[in-house]
Amino acid sequence: MLTIPLVLAAVRDSVGEEAARRYLPVLALAPYAIWTAVSLDGLVALLGAAAIVSGLRASRRRMRGWASTGWGILAGLLVGLASLFSYSAPWLGLSLVCVYFARRRPALNMLSGIGALLPVLGVQLLGFGWTEGLLAAETDYAHRVAPYRSVLWWSAISVVALLLAAGPPIFASARKVRNTAMWPFLVGAGAAIVFSIVAGLARGGAEHAWLPFFPWLTVAAVAPERPAGDPPPSPLLLVGLGAVVAVIVEGVLITPW
């Protein structure tokens, strides 16, 4: 799956190659891998990761002129393409906004915004209205799903699914998020999930619907214990526990694939 090398490229661009190497086991043995190959949201995760990598390239210190413009537009274009497959994908654009803010390149927001609109306007010309589709999906959800699934109960189930899918590294990541330059990645992913829960939309299917966000929730697991401190070793114990969780989940669910 190309999502893994793309996420690692984003980590390397932000905090260096050593941290990327130490993050590899966390990604490769993540429990949510059991859903990646059997869900369309795996494609959304790929497009989202490619968008963030493009945004990082656009905002590099020495990247200026047409090269920066091209990468910035490409970042938005990829977010727009992802949005055609998932209505939650635009939240990844918030990570781009935070990256541009952290690197003091605010003009790139306009370029990526233009890029994101291109696919949406393109399908509009072909007869599909993205906003109309979003409203239709919300109406269908409100009539077909919402009346039969309690908000509190199913939101709690979705949170449990999140913790199982992301695995133990999510706890280490949440604890050290302030100590790393990778915090923009967590903002978009975290905001999408929090919004889904608060809005009462997280009522089942979170294990695959949130696939585009899972890789970014655990990036701070390889962050130093203190800001600008020495990077810790790869959390192999947590990774091992996550792999065990994946085996147990698959064994309990007995999924057909």
Image (cartoon, rainbow, N blue to C red):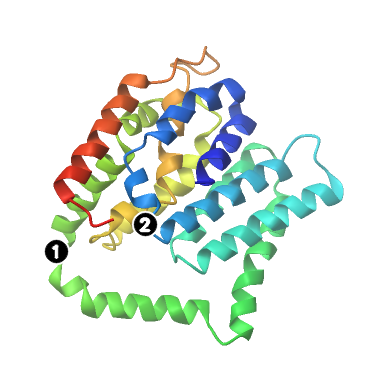
Name the residue carrying label 1: 150
179 relative to 16 in the view: left or right: left
**Is label 1 or label 2 in front?**
2
* Mark 2 neighbour density, 10 Å: few (under 14) some (14–19) many (20 or more): few
Q: Which corner quadrant of the image does residue 166 belong to?
A: top left
Which residue appears at 44% of the width and 47% of the height? 189
Which residue appears at 67% of the width and 57% of the height? 112
Helix, strand or loop at mark 1: loop
Residue 49, x across and y down, in percent: 55, 48
Which residue appears at 35% of the width and 26% of the height? 172
Helix, strand or loop at mark 2: loop
Residue 71, x across and y down, in percent: 73, 51
* Mark 1 neighbour density, 10 Å: few (under 14) some (14–19) many (20 or more): few
Instruction: Give the alpha-carbon distance from disc 1 to disc 2, as whole Å.
Output: 27 Å
Name the residue carrying label 2: 38
Give the residue at the far top of this rendering: 230
- Looking at this view, is 161 or 191 the one in front? 161
Q: Is 66 located above or below residue 167 in the figure?
A: below
Q: Which corner quadrant of the image does residue 80 belong to?
A: bottom right
Residue 121, x across and y down, in percent: 63, 77
